[in-house]
Amino acid sequence: MLYKLAHILRDKMRWLWDFIEMMNSVLFSWKYGKKVKDFVFSYIPEGYKLLPIKDISTEKLVEFFDRQPEDAFTYFKPHGFDDKSIKRLQRNKAFLAYVLMDKSNEQITGYCFNRSFFHGTGFRGRMVDVSYRNKGLGTAMNKILNDLGFGIGLRLYESVSKDNVASYKSAISASQIKILKEMPNNEILLEILP
Ligand SMILES: CC(C)(COP(=O)(O)OP(=O)(O)OC[C@H]1O[C@@H](n2cnc3c(N)ncnc32)[C@H](O)[C@@H]1OP(=O)(O)O)[C@@H](O)C(=O)NCCC(=O)NCCS
């Protein structure tokens, strides 16, 4: 219900979505800000570092999305990927987003987020750079998102298309899941279990 409403607001009533997003950021920060700040990640893949998107230049983030092939976005449409949209996400304290950076070349190799809500829920999403796929980074980022989300006390959800095999497999590999709902276009809503 909340998931559907969020999509309607985002797509059809942008001004209201922006206002709610701003209020959510304030309330989330008030309720969870300290927990997020003090959180220490227990798992980061070797050879990579994990950085919050607020510590990365907007230009570098936009470049990361720009260099991904068009088909990488078939099932991944969580937000805009232009400079303005990314800047807004970097300011949003409820959008817990991180990049995995390859230590050897300082290149962004993966992007992941828990889009969180002040009443205690988070929706996971992730993208792995096309030249770093199938090396376990997608699964690793799911573990990172679980680690943080459950660590600060959120309930976690994810919508995934059954046609997006790598995404579905990595969701399952990293977590116990419960299928909550079958949705149109072969999508399913999962609750991620701690
Ligand atoms: C989904 C995505 C993040 C997976 O990242 P990844 O680093 O390649 O995934 P992993 O290496 O962790 O592999 C996860 C599982 O998928 C399998 N897999 C990876 N690529 C695959 C492919 N092209 N076809 C079938 N299976 C694949 C792996 O073998 C692994 O299976 P296992 O757990 O049974 O061993 C990546 O494909 C991606 O960025 N896609 C575009 C964006 C997207 O769709 N995001 C998800 C929506 S939120």
Image: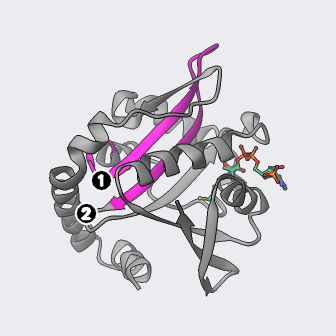
Q: Is residue 66 above or below residue 101?
A: below
Residue 118: mark in rendering? 2
Question: Hey, which residue is sitting farthest top in the picture?
Answer: 104
Q: Magenta stretch? A: 90-116
Residue 191: mark in rendering? none
- Horizontal and vertical percent position of residue 93: 26, 48
Pair 1/2: label in front = 2
Disc 2 is placed on an element classified as loop
Question: Hey, which residue is sitting farthest front in the picture?
Answer: 194
**Of 173 and 8, which appears nearest the observer?**
173
Q: Residue at x 55, y 65 (%)?
A: 192
**Of 104 and 117, which appears nearest the observer?**
117
Q: Residue at x 33, y 77 (%)?
A: 9
Q: Is residue 25 above or below residue 17?
A: above
Looking at the picture, which amino acid does disc 2 mark? Phe
Looking at the picture, which amino acid does disc 1 mark? Ala
Of pointers 1 and 2, the one earlier in the residue sequence: 1
Q: How many marks?
A: 2
Residue 27, quarter of picture: bottom left
Q: Is mark 1 within 8 Å of ligand 1?
A: no
Between the C-alphas of marks 1 and 2, the distance is 8 Å
User: Is residue 110 located in the magenta-colored stretch of the structure?
Assistant: yes
User: Is residue 145 located in the magenta-colored stretch of the structure?
Assistant: no
- Horizontal and vertical percent position of residue 132: 73, 34
